[in-house]
Amino acid sequence: MSAQLAPQALTGANLPIRLTRRGRLVLIGLPLMLGAAALLTLIGFFTAPALAASGTAAPGQAVSVAVSPGQTLWDVAVLAAPERHPQDVIAEIQELNGLPGSIIHAGQQLYIPVDR
């Protein structure tokens, strides 16, 4: 007579976890993406004050003017700071107003740097 063991039924607690390729990707990729997002947020948080502090003029150091018909950015720069070279003043005006070029329109409001 030989003894035979009856096969045991696997219950939910005994089953081994088997992940598909997609499951492994989610299990590894999701924490990596969350970690990268947290890292980028921290980098942005710590560099934003430094970028804001490096501006050429604070809000109290600029005045707003309206562009007159026929006026160019050169004319505005000469009127704003006659003792300085117009190209330097134009560069500051472009930076203060976020202008990509030198085109301005009549009635446009521009921030002009105040003499230092």
Image (cartoon, rainbow, N blue to C red):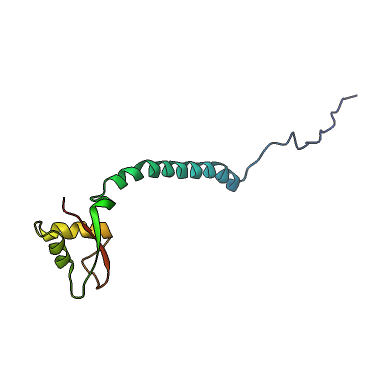
- Across and down, in percent, residue 114 comes to 19, 55
Q: Which residue is depicted at the point 21% across and 72% down? A: 68
Q: Residue furthest bottom?
A: 69
Is 7 left, or right, of 63 in this rendering? right
Q: Nearer the viewer, residue 88 or 12?
A: 88
Q: Nearer the viewer, residue 107 or 89?
A: 107
Q: Is residue 86 above or below residue 18?
A: below
Q: Residue 93 sits in which quadrant? A: bottom left
- Across and down, in percent, residue 113 comes to 20, 56
Q: How many marks?
A: 0
Q: Residue 89 sits in which quadrant? A: bottom left
Q: Nearer the viewer, residue 27 or 92?
A: 92
Q: Residue furthest right?
A: 1
Q: Nearer the viewer, residue 39 or 22?
A: 39
- Across and down, in percent, residue 6 comes to 85, 31
Is 30 left, or right, of 96 in this rendering? right
Is 11 left, or right, of 53 in this rendering? right
Q: Which residue is depicted at the point 49% across and 45% down? A: 33
- Across and down, in percent, residue 37 comes to 46, 45
Q: Which residue is depicted at the point 14% across and 64% down? A: 79
Q: Is residue 1 above or below residue 54?
A: above
Q: Quadrant of the N terminus?
A: top right
